[in-house]
Amino acid sequence: MGEVKLPILDRTATGENIKRLMRLNHITVSQLQMNLGMASATNVYKWCRGEILPSADRLLHLALIFNCHIEDILVTEKERENG
């Protein structure tokens, strides 16, 4: 059996994608923070800079807010390479 190549999440590209989805949906960082019930916007900024990825439950909430699938938020290294 051959080696299975698993996708690797690209934090930086995912952060750029979150910013793009925020722009498309006319949502500010503070609005996103409030919609997610977060005490601070620190993690939203970290997501956008690609320092960290949202947790699974936050991804689900983001998908609902952006009206998309979780897969539409996350970017893998292979996707970035293929443009």
Image (cartoon, rainbow, N blue to C red):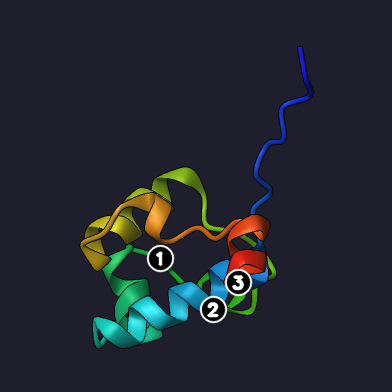
Query: Which numbered disc, 3 or 1, marks the residue that appears first in the sequence?
Result: 3
Marks 3 & 1, CB-CB < 8 Å contact: no
Please state which amino acid type lies under the numbered disc 1: Met
Residue 52 appears left or right of 74: right
Q: Determine the CA span between mark 3 and mark 2.
A: 5 Å
Marks 3 & 2, CB-CB < 8 Å contact: yes
Residue sitting at x 35%, y 76% = 21
Residue 4 appears left or right of 15: right
78 vs 14: above or below: above
Q: Position of residue 61 (x, y in %)?
A: 31, 54
Q: How would you rate the neighbour count of disc 3 (Cα within 10 Å): few for under 14, some for 14-19, many for 20 or more?
A: many
User: Label 3, on which residue?
Assistant: 13
Would you say residue 5 is visible in this rendering?
yes
Name the secondary structure under disc 2. Answer: helix
Query: Which numbered disc, 2 or 1, marks the residue that appears first in the sequence?
Result: 2
Q: Determine the CA span between mark 3 and mark 1.
A: 23 Å
Q: How would you rate the neighbour count of disc 1 (Cα within 10 Å): few for under 14, some for 14-19, many for 20 or more?
A: few
Q: Nearer the viewer, residue 76 or 83?
A: 83
Q: Determine the CA span between mark 2 and mark 1.
A: 20 Å
User: Label 1, on which residue?
Assistant: 38
User: Label 2, on which residue?
Assistant: 16
Marks 2 & 1, CB-CB < 8 Å contact: no
